[in-house]
Image: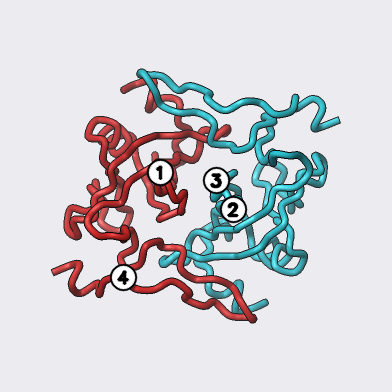
Chain colours: A cyan, B red
Amino acid sequence: MEPLLDAVHWDAQGLVPVIAQEQGSNDVLMVAWMNREALAETARRGQAVYWSRSRGRLWHKGEESGHVQQVHEIRLDCDADVVLLKVTQHGHEPGIACHTGRHSCFFRVWKNDEWQAVDPVLKDPERIYK
Amino acid sequence: MEPLLDAVHWDAQGLVPVIAQEQGSNDVLMVAWMNREALAETARRGQAVYWSRSRGRLWHKGEESGHVQQVHEIRLDCDADVVLLKVTQHGHEPGIACHTGRHSCFFRVWKNDEWQAVDPVLKDPERIYK
């Protein structure tokens, strides 16, 4: 795992931002963070494991919601300071990556001088996190 | 412009990470940073203007290379701490977003226990930055 981890330019907190992009549609689902352990676990399991900054611990995406991300590809950008995962978003059809119950976290568009939520809630969050 | 800018959760340096995603293909081209002025300029011009952390100044993408990004949409994620642009990458066909002369900055894939550059250089960087 060392070559995987050592190539990444970790920030001052030992973290790197990670884009989860849906295999097939190429939709950007979300951005989260990883530390070395999270990236190693992601590669080992073939499922996305992030570092939750708010909870201060590893976060196996889907551990509560069941909305697991199967990882097909791990990519690194030219500066080695952003990681991109190609994933299949499991647990619902279509996939729900956002804690608001939407497909993608990027559901707000700047339009007519305001931020508008343009993508539908696919499942009530209260039914996702029981 | 205030509602555009005030919704964003700027980090301690007054910056936000920005994903540039290609309209149509949905390819993720690159990730860069914006401050308030950069985001305001991007919205005003309809072209991507970033904050260059290395140069410490506004960076109108394509100012040297001619590889300008026309902005179709500005999106914000659920936590308001990542911006996503839907863009057309101008100046070459297919579009070149990366300073290495590649389509996307995410040209390295973790494969067979090594980082492999899997996407072609479309134009020699020495011919891009004359």
Who's the residue at 75% across and 47% down the image?
A90
* C-alpha separation, residue under disc 4 versus residue under disc 2: 24 Å
Mark 4 neighbour density, 10 Å: few (under 14) some (14–19) many (20 or more): some
Where is residue A120? Give x, y as percent.
Answer: 62, 25
Residue at the limit of the structure toward the left, as seen here: B130
Mark 3 neighbour density, 10 Å: few (under 14) some (14–19) many (20 or more): some
Tell if the residue under mark 4 belongs to the same chain as the one under mark 1. yes
Most foreground residue, B54 or A78: A78
Residue A24 numbered mark, or none: 2
* C-alpha separation, residue under disc 1 versus residue under disc 3: 29 Å
| Quadrant housing the C terminus of chain B | bottom left
- Which residue is tagged 3? A27
Tell if the residue under mark 2 belongs to the same chain as the one under mark 1. no
Who's the residue at 67% across and 29% down the image?
A100
Which secondary structure, mark 1? Answer: loop
Who's the residue at 50% across and 38% down the image?
B81
Residue B13 numbered mark, or none: 1
Which secondary structure, mark 2? Answer: loop
Where is residue B74? Give x, y as percent.
Answer: 40, 34
- Which residue is tagged 4? B122
